[in-house]
């Protein structure tokens, strides 16, 4: 067996299910689930119609590279959205369709981690750096690639962003891969140009790859300030060959199609071609009907704008209710809130479920305790994915829970 299997932590939602099974609900109030980042907004008709139209293509094998028209649509969207130099992103050389970013984020580490790499004094297990808290796939991918995870705490004092200066040089020397998540899950924080510039210099010096999970990039709250991307920041520095840079994008959040499992990776041509070779054997090509529906999704921005408007309305309404009773701030992007809790995060989530039938995710389920502390302790993740009326109702119940129960503990 892969020795990494024994090192895997229970998945956050496995832990949440267990927590709820051990808790009795003492209210008749309707259950509202704000724990899972699964978009509930209506899937655009143009995507559903194209899926139905293309279903007969189920009888044909797809290729790993995908059809030319899909890669071209992805390349055009990426270049326009992030203002990349003309011709710097080639649909043939720099783009690869994937079945959602989750499987690609995992598979990428299996592809690029080199256990036999002894250059630059990397004589021990390779290191993969991750933000803390984090999307658990980063850790699982690291452990199953037989690498060693290293966590950078993302705390309020630092704007919930990773402090690269805090990483010891001996860790950088062993680093082969760093996962970024911007906008962040669960914090919604956006990494800026200067931080990416610093990280690119470190990557050049210590010879590692930057893998940027940008699946929340289209859920931002200021229409005039879309989050910068890794490739955009690299191009701004004249690095339009995108060396050492890979980005991951998905339709799940952008277009409300999490079940369609459609996304892409883009960036450094050498890395893309190596990942293509890996995926050819991995056997994970995107179905043709999904490819066709993805083309129309990437080519339309109207539905994405509507999506952002709906999330802004929910943030405004919910924060008006929660701010008087919690330390909670509006994020730069994503659809999550990351508030502090007046009691432990697990106690808060358990009591809220029991007394008010609201499910949120304890922050410590998304983090690891390290020497610098556990940044998930005494925080919860609230996913504002339900309809606005449900989000408002949930916020009112949370407010009532804090006022009547938490303050008496």
Image (cartoon, grey):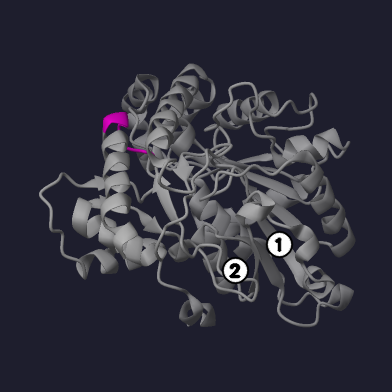
Which circle's residue, 2 or 1, is located before the other in the chain?
2
Residue at left 47%, top 74%? 8
User: 52 above or below 375?
Assistant: above
Residue at left 49%, top 55%? 283
Is residue 281 in view from this perspective?
Answer: no
Left or right, residue 208 beside residue 358: right
CB of mark 2 within 8 Å of CB of mark 1? yes
Q: Which percent across, then down, holds residue 102?
A: 50, 52
Question: Which residue is nearer to you in this view: 210 or 311?
Answer: 311
Magenta-colored span: 384-389
Say few, some or many: other residues with alpha carbon within 10 Å of mark 1 (under 14 / 14 to 19 / 20 or more). Answer: many
* Residue 304 belongs to magenta span: no
Q: Residue furthest left?
A: 28
Total marks in image: 2
Q: Which percent across, then down, holds residue 302?
A: 48, 16
The secondary structure making up most of the magenta span is loop
Tell me which corner region of the image, top left, top right, bottom left or bottom right, holds residue 49.
top left
Q: Which percent across, then down, holds residue 266?
A: 67, 41
Left or right, residue 2 beside residue 361: right
Question: Which residue is nearer to you in this view: 214 or 33?
Answer: 33
Name the residue that disc number 2 marks. Answer: 142
């Amino acid at each position: 067996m892969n020795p990494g299997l024994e090192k895997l932590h229970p998945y956050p939602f496995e832990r949440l299910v267990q927590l709820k099974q051990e808790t009795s609900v003492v209210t008749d109030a309707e259950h509202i689930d704000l724990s899972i980042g699964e978009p509930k907004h209506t899937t655009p008709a143009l995507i559903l119609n194209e899926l139905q139209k293309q279903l007969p293509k189920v009888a044909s094998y797809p290729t790993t590279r995908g059809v030319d028209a899909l890669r071209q649509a992805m390349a055009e969207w990426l270049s326009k959205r992030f203002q990349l130099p003309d011709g710097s992103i080639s649909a043939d050389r720099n783009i690869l369709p994937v079945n959602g970013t989750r499987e690609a984020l995992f598979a990428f580490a299996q592809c690029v981690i080199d256990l036999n790499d002894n250059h630059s004094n990397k004589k021990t297990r390779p290191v993969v750096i991750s933000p803390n808290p984090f999307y658990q796939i980063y850790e699982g991918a690291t452990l199953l690639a037989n690498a060693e995870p290293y966590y950078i705490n993302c705390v309020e004092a630092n704007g919930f962003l990773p402090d690269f200066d805090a990483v010891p040089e001996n860790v950088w020397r062993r680093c082969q891969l760093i996962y970024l998540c911007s906008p962040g899950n669960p914090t919604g924080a956006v990494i800026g140009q200067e931080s990416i510039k610093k990280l690119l210099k470190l990557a050049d010096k210590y010879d590692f790859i930057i893998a940027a999970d940008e699946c929340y990039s289209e859920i931002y709250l200021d229409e005039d300030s879309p989050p910068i991307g890794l490739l955009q920041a690299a191009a701004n520095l004249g690095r339009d060959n995108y060396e050492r840079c890979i980005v991951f994008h998905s339709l799940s959040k952008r277009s409300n199609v999490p079940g369609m499992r459609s996304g892409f990776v883009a960036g450094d041509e050498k890395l893309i071609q190596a990942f293509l070779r890996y995926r050819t054997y991995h056997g994970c090509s995107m179905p043709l009907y999904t490819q066709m529906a993805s083309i129309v999704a990437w080519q339309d921005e109207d539905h994405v704008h509507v999506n952002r408007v709906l999330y802004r309305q929910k943030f405004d309404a919910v924060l008006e209710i929660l701010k008087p009773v919690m330390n909670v701030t509006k994020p730069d992007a994503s659809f999550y809130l990351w508030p502090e809790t007046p009691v432990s995060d697990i106690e808060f989530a358990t009591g809220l479920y029991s007394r008010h039938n609201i499910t949120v995710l304890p922050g410590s389920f998304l983090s690891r305790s390290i020497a610098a502390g556990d940044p998930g302790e005494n925080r919860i993740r609230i996913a504002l994915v339900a309809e606005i009326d449900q989000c408002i109702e949930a916020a009112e119940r949370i407010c009532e829970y804090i006022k009547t129960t938490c303050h008496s503990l």
